[in-house]
Image (spheres, rainbow, N blue to C red):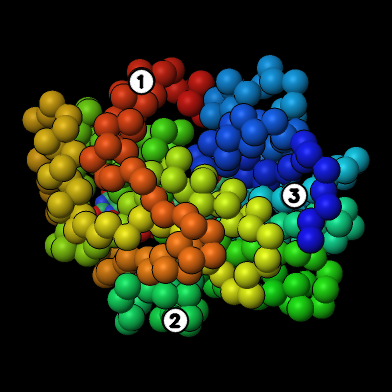
Amino acid sequence: MDMTPLPRTILVAGGAGFIGSHLCAALLEEGHRVIALDSYQTGTRHNVAGLLGHRNFRLIDGEVETLPPISGRIDRIYNLASPASPPAYQADPVRTMMTNVVGTNNLLALAEAKGARLLQASTSEVYGDPEVHPQPEGYTGHVSCTGPRACYDEGKRAAEALCYDYLRAGRTDVRVARIFNTYGPNMQCDDGRIVSNLICQALSDEPMTIYGTGQQTRSFCYVADMVAGLMALMEVPETPDAPVNIGNPGEFTILDLAELIRSMVPTSAHPVFRPLPKDDPQRRRPDISRAKALLGWEPRVPLEQGLKETIPYFAEALQRPAIAAAG
Ligand code: NAD
Ligand code: UDP
């Protein structure tokens, strides 16, 4: 039974990132004290600019591999610190692996020292290029441990292993969320992921890049649904003995997504085909039965509605001076 008094003090590592910034806002909305820690490797101060004046919000510059000391009480730790887009995590693959392994270990040790509960942001990438479809949590995956995605996939798998080692040893209470493709405001225009690329290309009348045939699939979750799922998993009283998939089971081909975006943005842009990156998963769709049963959670926002919320954000972000977007 969790006896932590309310409001809680909650550390969000990666709090200036895309999902992290929405999570910080939602936690503040619930009345908690929030400390965001970020290295700004892929996130920006701009993402949390609206929170900086909040009396319960603190932003710390730092990286999880060399965790700065954080004094005082901490009741909850969300570990979202890691680049998430393939070009970003492959730009410095050794660093990506260390962020996920050393960084997660440092945060688990901090959770142990503070008596805090930790939620690890894992990923559908632990399933690799899956041979089981849709993917249930019991599927152990089909991951290349030497390919260009391994720094991220294997880093996240090692981080999951660390979480359960701490849990089994009775050192910390952990929750592991396997996050499937998520989109929404506060993604970076140039981060290289499919939703940001296609919307920004359409808005700029530039060719919409489709890698491979575009017949590969992904399942896209709107960020508000994702944040609700993560918070539900963090607060479910009984510690689940295994990871929980959080994502939207609606499955679309990349070409379907491009056509949907083209129908929603006035544009002269057309799809152009580019080579498929190595080890790019062909199909991906979460089995969310466990999340539904354990958390009573399921996504509410269909893709078209989520895109309608997201497109104006990118239209505004493209107008921003580059210096604001970077800092
Ligand atoms: P993001 O890149 O926008 O956010 C990650 C944040 O972590 C950024 O603000 C970045 O600057 C920060 N960061 C990176 N390395 C750090 C370090 N060493 N120390 C401190 N901060 C560091 O990505 P996101 O989409 O918000 O993803 C958040 C988390 O969710 C990541 O752990 C990611 O692996 C996971 N995830 C995301 C998705 C998705 O579709 N968005 C899917 C699966 C898993
Ligand atoms: N993709 C694409 N064009 C782009 C960016 C990505 O066709 O401009 C494809 C990519 O090859 C993958 C899918 O879209 O099949 C999703 O890519 P993303 O980088 O968003 O996330 P992933 O699920 O691969 O981590």
Work out whether mark 2 precedes mark 3 in sequence or the reverse, and give the earlier one: 3
Q: Secondary structure at mark 2?
A: loop
Indicate the position of residue 313 as horizontal and vertical percent values: 36, 26
Q: Amino acid at mark 1?
A: Glu
The mark found on residue 249 in the picture is none
Q: Amino acid at mark 2?
A: Tyr
**Where is 323 relative to 118, above or below?**
above
Q: Are marks 2 and 1 in contact (CB under 8 Å)?
A: no
How far apart are the two marked residues, 2 and 3, measured between alpha carbons?
28 Å
Residue at 75% of width from left, 64% of height from top? 173
Residue at 51% of width from left, 46% of height from top? 228
The mark found on residue 316 in the picture is 1
> Is residue 155 left or right of 181 when viewed as pictured?
right
> Is residue 162 left or right of 93 when viewed as pictured?
right
Residue at 69% of width from left, 74% of height from top? 164
Work out whether mark 2 precedes mark 1 in sequence or the reverse, and give the earlier one: 2
Front position in the image: 27 or 274: 27
Q: Which residue is mark 3?
A: 76
> Where's the N terminus, which quadrant?
bottom right
